[in-house]
């Protein structure tokens, strides 16, 4: 309800769902962390309510499309290192420090793997579809549905 109040009380128009938000804005927020891209004009005040709203949009995305497998693996490693740290604090078993270092190294290696940029993926999608994709028009939902279908061999 708090988010709905925020939407109605803001003077600037914001994207309220991933069904209407352009993928361009989504990518800009992901890469820069600047929440002004939640505003349709890309200009507006960034406050705590906007952070909550961004989290709600991310939850909507996860509920609809799930988590990427590499991100899921990274989360599992982060949970493992947290548990190991807790166990070390409780037991003072210094052998656990070796395990902690190995898991942290795995996390760092996973972070170093560079994926394709948005525009590299866009290029592949355009070649597959046979037409130009305008990231300022295509919504988050349309974009990730296209990628999901392409990975399943369904997109045409």
Image (cartoon, grey):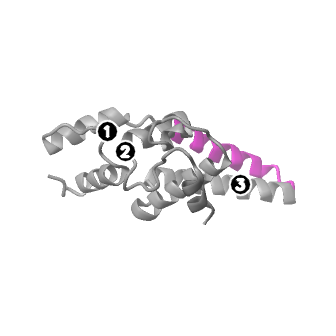
Please tell me which residue lies in front, 142 or 74: 142
Left or right, residue 43 beside residue 46? left
Distance from disc 1 to disc 2, alpha carbons, whole Å, reads: 6 Å
Q: In the image, what residue occupies the spot 43% across and 53% down? A: 68
Local crowd size for mark 2, using a 10 Å CA cut-off: few (<14), some (14–19), many (≥20): many
Tell which circle, 3 or 2, labels the residue nearer the N-terminal end: 2
Q: Which residues are magenta?
A: 92-111
Q: In the image, what residue occupies the spot 18% across and 54% down? A: 155
The residue singled out by tag 3 in the image is 82
Dominant SS type (magenta)? helix
Residue 18 within the magenta-colored segment of the rendering: no
Up/down of 36 relative to 73, above or below:
above
Label for residue 33?
Answer: none
Local crowd size for mark 3, using a 10 Å CA cut-off: few (<14), some (14–19), many (≥20): few
Q: In the image, what residue occupies the spot 60% across and 48% down? A: 50
Q: Secondary structure at mark 3?
A: helix
Quarter holding residue 138: top left
The residue singled out by tag 1 in the image is 135
């Amino acid at each position: 309800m708090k988010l709905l109040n925020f939407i109605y009380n803001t003077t600037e128009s914001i994207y309220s769902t991933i069904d209407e938000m352009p993928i361009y804005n989504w990518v800009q927020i992901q890469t820069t962390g600047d929440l002004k891209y939640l505003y349709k004009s890309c200009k507006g005040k960034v406050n705590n309510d906007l952070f909550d709203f961004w989290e709600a949009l991310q939850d909507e995305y996860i509920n609809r499309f799930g988590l990427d497998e590499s991100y899921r693996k990274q989360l599992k490693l982060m949970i493992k290192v947290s548990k190991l740290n807790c166990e070390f604090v409780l037991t003072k078993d210094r052998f656990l420090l070796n395990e902690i270092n190995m898991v942290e190294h795995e996390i760092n290696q996973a972070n170093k793997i560079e994926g394709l940029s948005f525009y590299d993926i866009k290029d592949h999608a355009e070649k597959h579809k046979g037409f130009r994709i305008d990231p300022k028009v295509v919504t988050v939902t349309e974009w990730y549905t296209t990628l999901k279908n392409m990975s399943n061999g369904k997109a045409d």
